[in-house]
Amino acid sequence: MLAFIYLLLLSYVDISSSISQINTVFILAGQSNMAGRGGVVNGTSWDGYIPPQCQPNPSILRLNKELSWVLATEPLHKDIDTNKTCGVGPGMAFANSVVRRDPSIGVVGLVPCGVGGTNISEWRRGSHLYNQLLRRSAAALGTGGRIRAVIWYQGESDTLNLEDANLYKRRLHRFINHFRSDLQFPSLQLILVVLASGEGPYVEVVREAQLGTHLPNVRHVDAKGLPLGVDRLHLTTAAQVQLGHMLADAFLRRELPLPARSCSSKLSGGFVLEFLMRFVKWIPVL
């Protein structure tokens, strides 16, 4: 009850000044362990427990389904991954850790894009998920922030058959290269979570593909060994908090290259953000 009252009060917090000060944007993409299943019981209900490390912070905002910035609260993906019940993911623990450890980071904007049960082929260029990822990234850039990293946690669905598992590395490389190219940001940082579990028997094949991905500015965070729920697939709430801290460690390990920012900045080929903001208007929302 107290938690509900606290969240209700937070909903009245004026974040207008924070929106104008967004300096750092993180894209959260992948499938269910990114969207968050921490605290989800029997796949149908969330227990409502929010750890201290995942509590709302006026310096952490979330881009909602309507492409508006709101105060970030768990579950971060509640209006994005709508076909399943969402719980705690790694995003809030990550953002709170980064803000606490590096005050110069400023106001953080989180852009949830994860959708449970998705194969990497469903993220190929031109697909609904890929277009949605571009559309939401463009909208986030339009308010003046800089994309500092994409956090990618996906691959459990690609462990179901050997063909998908064997093709994972090639498909992942293609996804990263296409996304960087379409943003015209070749040095875009990607933090790749290496699988802790999978839906099928080829977990190690996909893990090997992920660990063997050595593209520039790709960092690895290995989730193997983190506690899993009773389904042996999804990370527990405590594990998601631990993963969030591991992601923060990876991000803060060294200074990043100059990231993409809003259309007010002078990017090479400076028309890119104007193009992306126009792109937002015609990508169909399915």
Image (cartoon, grey):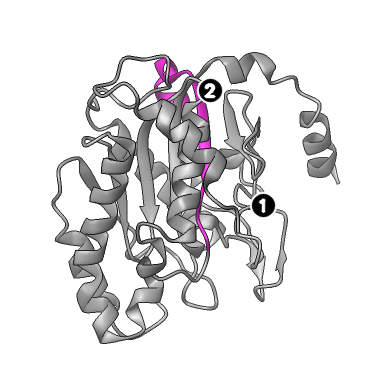
Position in image of residue 251 (x %, y %)? 31, 36
Residue 205 located left or right of residue 249: left
Question: How many marks on residues?
Answer: 2
Q: Is residue 197 visible?
A: no
Asked if residue 102 lies in the magenta stretch, the reply is yes
Does 110 sit above or below residue 87?
above
Write the residue at 66% across / 61% down. 82
Q: Nearer the viewer, residue 270 or 209?
A: 270
Q: Amino acid type of disc 1? A: Asp
Q: Nearer the viewer, residue 169 or 106?
A: 169
| Label 1 Cα crowd, 10 Å radius (few <14 / some 14-19 / many 20+) | some
Residues 99 and 81: in front is 81
- Residue 143, numbered label: 2
Q: Nearer the viewer, residue 126 or 246?
A: 126
Task: Give the residue type that dot 2 points to.
Answer: Thr
Q: What are the residue bounds of the magenta stretch?
A: 93-115
Would residue 72 appear left or right of 129 to someone viewing this image? right
Task: Locate residue 93 relative to residue 153 in the image: left or right.
Answer: right
Find the distance from the CA under tag 1 to the CA under tag 2: 21 Å
Q: Is residue 200 left or right of residue 180?
A: right
Q: Position of residue 31 (x, y in %)?
A: 47, 62
Instruction: Give the x, y percent position of residue 14.
Output: 74, 19
- As for residue 250 lying within the magenta part, the answer is no
Q: To which residue does mark 1 refer? A: 79
Task: Write the residue at 53% across / 78% down.
Answer: 231
Residue that appears at 58% across and 60% down: 38
Sequence-wise, the earlier of marks 1 and 2 is 1
